[in-house]
Amino acid sequence: MKKIVLVNDLMQQKYAYELIEPTGANFHKDFKPELSPQEMLSLGVFGGKYMTDCEVEFPKSWFAKAKLCHEFHDPELNFFAVNASQPLQVWQQKGWIYSEDPRGWFQWYCRYFLGRRLNNGEDERQIKRWRLFRRHLIQVERNCLPLDYNCRRVQRQALLHWAYDARRL
């Protein structure tokens, strides 16, 4: 059964979207994220500042072990304890932000994971961006010893931000 999600947070008011697929299933054939949004939040991503006002929109279980900081971006909360984020303003200036997902790629991914699908080309655009980020995974594999978490920590953290499990590299 289809479900409508209503969003009223600091960045979106009176926004609604429809879930048409089961949670965590029926992804595009080219989209195979290694981490769920819940796993990403529990590992520590985006300095804990991302989605601190979105707990009503997403499942409570996603936030049970999430490493969040409501006050400020704290890189120490990230799995690799480094800052691998750019300010939202940079993303906006580069045209990477889709108007219905004003927080960027991770917000799109969370909604896609829940079962939202867009037929306007946005899903394909975001999946293409995700696939292109794989170049960072290849760089870590080529330049670091396996499981050497001190090698390319910022790149590893950025991979976590894009649902690639950099802990296994």
Image (spheres, rainbow, N blue to C red):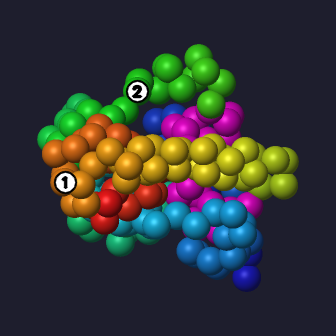
Q: Which residue is mark 1?
A: 148
Work out whether residue 161 can be spotted. Answer: no
- Identify the residue at image location x=21%, y=37%: 82
Q: Quadrant of the N terminus?
A: bottom right
Judged left or right of residue 3, residue 135 is: left
- Range of residues picked out in magenta: 97-117
Indicate which disc, 2 or 1, sits on the residue closer to the N terminus: 2
Question: For the residue carrying disc 1, how many other residues have a C-alpha within 10 Å: few (<14), some (14-19), or many (20+)?
Answer: few
**92 vs 137, nearest the viewer:** 137
* Circle 2 SS class: loop
Residue that numbered label 2 is attached to: 86
Report x, y in % for residue 5.
62, 61
In the depicted view, which residue is nearer to us: 28 or 133? 133
What percent of the width, then of the height, locates residue 44?
Answer: 26, 52
Residue 89 percent coordinates (x, y): 49, 20
Mark 2 belongs to which amino acid? Gln
Q: Is residue 105 above or below residue 86?
A: below
Front-most of 90 and 6? Answer: 90
- Most extreme residue toward the bottom is 1
Distance between mark 2 and mark 1 Cα atoms: 24 Å
Q: Position of residue 106 (x, y in %)?
A: 50, 48
Outermost residue on the right side: it is 120
Left of 148 or right of it: where is 89? right
**Dot 2, crowdedness within 10 Å: few (<14), some or many (≥20)?**
few
For image coordinates 58% across by 49% down, the residue present is 130
Which one is in front in this view, the residue at disc 2 or the one at disc 1? Answer: 1
Report helix, strand or loop for mark 1.
loop
Amino acid under disc 1: Asp
Which mark is drawn over residue 77? none
Q: Residue at x 22, y 44 (%)?
A: 151
Residue 113, magenta (yes or no): yes
